[in-house]
Image (cartoon, rainbow, N blue to C red):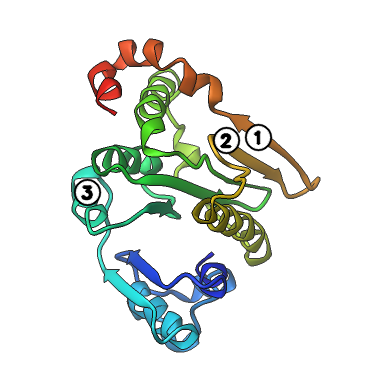
Amino acid sequence: MLAHLASAGFSRYTLIDGDTVQPQNLNRQIVYGFSDVGRRKVDAAADWLATRNPEAAVRVVPRMLTDASSLIPELREGISLLVVAADFPTDIGLRAAHACIETRTALIGADCGLHTASWGPLLEPADLAAYISAMEAVLDRAPVPPAARPMTASFGPTNAIVASYLARDIVNWFAGLAVHSYRKKMVIDLDTLTAESVDHQEVLDSVSVAAQRTGFRALTEKT
């Protein structure tokens, strides 16, 4: 995704990751090479961006931000859209949504396995309270089973597919064009090459019911 955004002309980035480049990353994370193994991912990615656009403004945050309280200060540095590409902890999207609602930051995420891939929903700040309420209600009823934590494998060509669609929606959002994943989670079956969308519109429009259940009424009215 980073490569697509750089090619599209984006020139301002905040890269957040506390991990280092490992050999197994090289099959799918194409901005890294063998010489980067052992380096901090954010440093290697920033160096790669500099080769594509020497004038790019790249801010690196070399640590894991796994809760809303640690993410909020970073979002207050002028981030317009938070892209969640992490898969751990499994509720990282929900934690990111809590941070985004405090900072009025738009949010999108993606994930990819060997057989399925998804991206979205892209949520505006005004959508986040309803989304948080609905997702917490879902987790209360059906917690993520241990077998799903975290995704065990992914593959470069399939990652590239979802990265391309994700980048396309990000570019379109900034350009004011139609976004396929706006308020929708787009899901691709990589074996059958079929796609479907999980429409969050009804969930977002029923905010009052969800808010009453999880105590977000005041937060919803505030936004």
Quarter of the figure that contains the N terminus: bottom right
Per the model, the C-alpha gap separating discs 1 and 3 is 30 Å
Q: Position of residue 23 (x, y in %)?
A: 49, 76
Q: Amino acid at mark 1?
A: Ser
* Residue position for label 2: 184
Please identify the residue farthest to the front as the structure is shown.
176
Mark 1: give few (<14), some (14-19) or many (20+) Cα within 10 Å: some
For disc 3, the marked residue is 72
Q: Nearer the viewer, residue 134 or 100?
A: 100
Judged left or right of residue 112, residue 211 is left
Tags 2 and 1 touching, CB below 8 Å? yes
Residue 194 shows up from this direction: yes
100 sits left or right of 190 in the view = left
Residue count near mark 2 (Cα–Cα under 10 Å), binned few <14, some 14–19, many ≥20: some
Residue 79 placement (x, y as % from top left): 32, 56
1 or 3: tag closer to the N-terminus: 3
Of residues 180 and 72, the one drawn nearer to the viewer in this rendering: 180
* Residue at 81%, 45% in the rendered image: 192
